[in-house]
Amino acid sequence: GKASSGGGSQDVVSPQRIAHEQLFGTVGAKFPTVFRDSIRFHTWLCVAQIVYSTTQIIFRDGAALYLGGDSDIGNPEMVMPEFVLWSVFVASALFQLSLAPTTFLNYCFVTNVEEFVDMDVVKKSFKNDGEAVGA
């Protein structure tokens, strides 16, 4: 089948060369590009969340907690829960950023080795495992 990319990239029709690309339907052979673009988009969303959360919320709440009653805050009872919640958001964004390179490396490994699989050997190994289990 044929596939074309969407978004800001060029609309180039790419043939699906291997079973892995056929699995992804319309993305097809453009999957590496789409996957790369999704990592870029995800990375910038995480960076934006980290920058916004720390500069606009966490620093403000941290200052309010540090100053105690001397600060002019609207709802003092909600400062600590808000500080903890937004700190968790930042921690999760940092964790997500740490996963993106590993995910991309795993994708590269899978797509590079899948064509080297000898299906006869795989079938024989399943057959041998079945005989060993039944014995």
Image (cartoon, grey):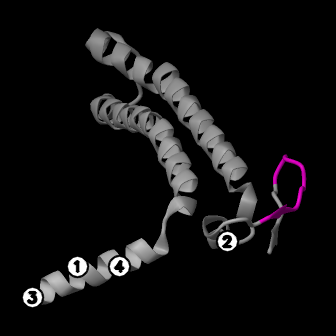
User: Could you tell me if the residues under marks 2 and 3 are in contact, i.e. CB atoms within 8 Å?
Assistant: no
Residue 83 image position (x, y, % from top left): 34, 29
Quadrant location of residue 85? Answer: top left
Residue 76 image position (x, y, % from top left): 31, 28
Q: Earlier in the sequence, mark 3 or mark 1?
A: 1
Looking at the picture, which amino acid does disc 1 mark?
Asp
Q: Earlier in the sequence, mark 2 or mark 3?
A: 2
Q: CA distance from mark 2 to mark 1?
A: 29 Å
Q: Which mark is residue 124?
A: 4
Q: Which residues are magenta?
A: 7-15
Q: CA distance from mark 4 to mark 2?
A: 25 Å
Q: Earlier in the sequence, mark 4 or mark 3?
A: 4
- Residue drawn at x 37%, y 13% as measured from the top left: 63
Residue 41 image position (x, y, % from top left): 65, 41
Q: Earlier in the sequence, mark 1 or mark 4?
A: 4
Count neighbours of disc 2 (C-alpha within 10 A) and say few if under 14, some if 14 to 19, many if 20 or more: some
Nearer to me, 28 or 117:
117
Q: Which residue is mark 2?
A: 22
